[in-house]
Amino acid sequence: MELARQVLEGAVDRVIRSVDDHDEFVCRPHPPGQIARALVGGKLTAVHRRGKTMWCETDTEHTLGVHLGMGGRVIVTNDAGERIGGGPERPDRQPRKAEWDRFTIVFADGGRFRLFDKRRLGRIRLDPDLDGLGPDAEDITGQDFRIRIARSRTAVKARLLDQSVLAGVGNLPADETLWRAKINPAVPADELAPKDLDRLYRHLEKALQDAIAHGGVHTGEVIEHRRPGGHCPRCGAEMVHGTVGGRSTWWCAKEQA
């Protein structure tokens, strides 16, 4: 998500000429045209992020909220049509379909900001409510992490994914972190010893840092082994699949038993 925020910085201080907000699902609860009327003629002035939620200050009376969901991408181009932030123009390596651009801002210089979202799980909205978000996973202290995670009997993976507890941890980094820490994803969070919580915190911080350094959460050490027939890259044991906290989950049969 930090990479997406950095890319979105490329949209700052550029006059908005037009807005395509026709997708009523991605832009809910706004009807088509409402976001356009609020932003056209203005500029994005600053970009912020907490967890998986980004929001842009503008020189209008509104802020613009951007949430990428599970597979959305922020794509910003300059006045020459070149993508800002590097990487391929077609991030999923498939021919891009126009309908996968769920929201588009066209700037007066000819460049664009697009929410590219094949799965249509992202979200754009005006003046998003941020009060329900917990602290950002990259900024939380070890002490606050221990308190927040351990105050519930729900599975530790479910606690990691709860954005009101800790903002910014998705399904892949949760599996990566628990695998690195050798902790079963289904263990009740309040049964973890202080040393286990400290280890989990250290590995979460490292997993997030590595994801930023290497280009995304899909680059984690265990991620490519989360599949039928996959084996733990550390000990060679079979990877096990199940559902924890309502989410598809993989773990090592030996080290996370």
Image (cartoon, rainbow, N blue to C red):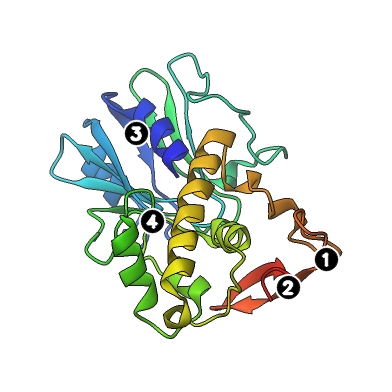
Q: Are marks 4 and 2 in contact (CB under 8 Å)?
A: no
Residue 165 picture location, percent across and down: 34, 68
The residue lying toward the viewer, choosing from 132 and 145, is 145
Q: Residue furthest top?
A: 80
Which residue is depicted at the point 38% across and 65% down? 163
Residue 177 picture location, percent across and down: 56, 58
Label 3 crowd bin: few (<14), some (14–19), many (20+), radius 10 Å: some
In terms of sequence position, does the residue under pointer 3 or pointer 2 come before the other?
3
Q: What's the amino acid at mark 4?
A: Cys
Q: What's the amino acid at mark 3?
A: Ser
Residue on which disc 4 sits: 27
What separation in Å lies between label 3 and label 4 (alpha carbons)?
16 Å
Horizontal side of 98 relative to 135 (left or right) equals right
**Secondary structure category for the residue under label 3:** strand
Q: Residue furthest front?
A: 195
Name the mark nearer the viewer: 4 or 2. Answer: 2
What separation in Å lies between label 1 and label 3 (alpha carbons)?
46 Å
Q: What's the amino acid at mark 2?
A: His
**With respect to residue 157, does 208 lie above or below?**
above
What separation in Å lies between label 2 and label 1 (alpha carbons)?
8 Å
Q: Residue furthest left?
A: 61
In terms of sequence position, does the residue under pointer 1 or pointer 3 come before the other?
3
Residue on which disc 2 sits: 241
What separation in Å lies between label 4 and label 2 (alpha carbons)?
34 Å
Horizontal side of 197 relative to 141 (left or right) equals right
Which residue is depicted at the point 41% across and 71% down? 194
Q: In the picture, which quadrant includes the N terminus?
A: top left
In terms of sequence position, does the residue under pointer 4 or pointer 2 come before the other?
4
